[in-house]
Amino acid sequence: MRGVILYGPPASGKDTVTAALHELDSRFTLYQRLKVGPGRTTGYRMTDAATLDQLRERGEVVWENHRYDARYVVDHPSLAQQLSTGVPVVHLGQKAAVAAVTAAVVGACWLVVYLWCPREVAEQRIVLRNTGDTAERLRAWDDTEPLAERDLFLNTAEMSPRAAAEVIHRHVLGDARPAILRS
């Protein structure tokens, strides 16, 4: 059971690198966190507060954070299921979340990748997204702590998404060629 954690501030390239990883090898798939609240729905499993409360009562919430007037949750059942069928790529932006996710499923091996880009580059990317919440996303960028406990550090302003995906792929699966691994 192998997984990848892409840690980093907003607009550091988590979505783009995940897409490049999936294109390189279809076993790498975005782990879709549960979400309750407004905003983007793509890349999330939308749910309601009652469902999150039930998960919490059963002890199945691995990590929960609140940002952009929404709640985001990594839940144990879906994480364990995705680890058993492929290589989940989990997007995180809090140091404590990395510790919680890596400890959540016994026997899972995680590659922790700190994706980063200069704040000016992040601001340009956020503005191009046209989400209307640039100031809030830049505050989140400022609040994202550097991650010293990581396996890789990749500056996405200095490498293409494909190059980043290839580096991650090699670290997760060794020197095997992606064309052979594709299922």
Image (cartoon, helix red, strand yellow):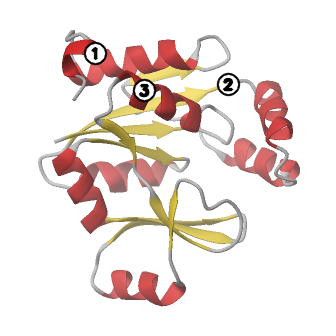
The secondary structure type at the circle numbered 2 is: loop
> What residue sits right under mark 3 in the picture?
23
Horizontal relation, residue 73 to residue 59: left or right: right
Residue positioned 60% across, 41% down in the render: 145
What is the C-alpha distance between the residues marked 3 and 1? Answer: 10 Å
Identified at 46% across, 60% down, the residue is 33
Residue displayed at 50% across by 77% down: 47
For the residues marked 2 and 1, what is the alpha-carbon distance in whole angstroms? 27 Å
Label 1, residues with CA under 10 Å away: few <14, some 14-19, many ≥20: some
Depth check: give the residue in front, 177 or 169. 177
Residue 1 is situated, as x and y percent measured from the top left of the image, at 16, 42
Residue with the mark numbered 1: 178
Question: In this rendering, which labeled residue sits more in front, label 2 or label 3?
Answer: 3
In the displayed structure, 95 sits above or below 19; it is: below
**SS at mark 1?**
helix
* Kind of residue sitting beneath label 2: Cys
Q: Secondary structure at mark 3?
A: helix
Q: Earlier in the sequence, mark 2 or mark 1?
A: 2
In primary-sequence order, the first of circles 2 and 3 is 3
Tell me: residue 114, above or below residue 137: above
| Labels 2, 1: front one | 1
Q: Are marks 3 and 1 in contact (CB under 8 Å)?
A: no
- Locate the C terminus and report the quarter of the image it occupies: top left
Q: Position of residue 53 (x, y in %)?
A: 43, 87
Q: Mark 3: which amino acid?
A: Glu
Q: Quadrant of residue 54?
A: bottom left
Residue for point 61% across, 20% down: 156
User: What residue sits right under mark 2 in the picture?
Assistant: 117
| Residue 104 shows up from this direction | no
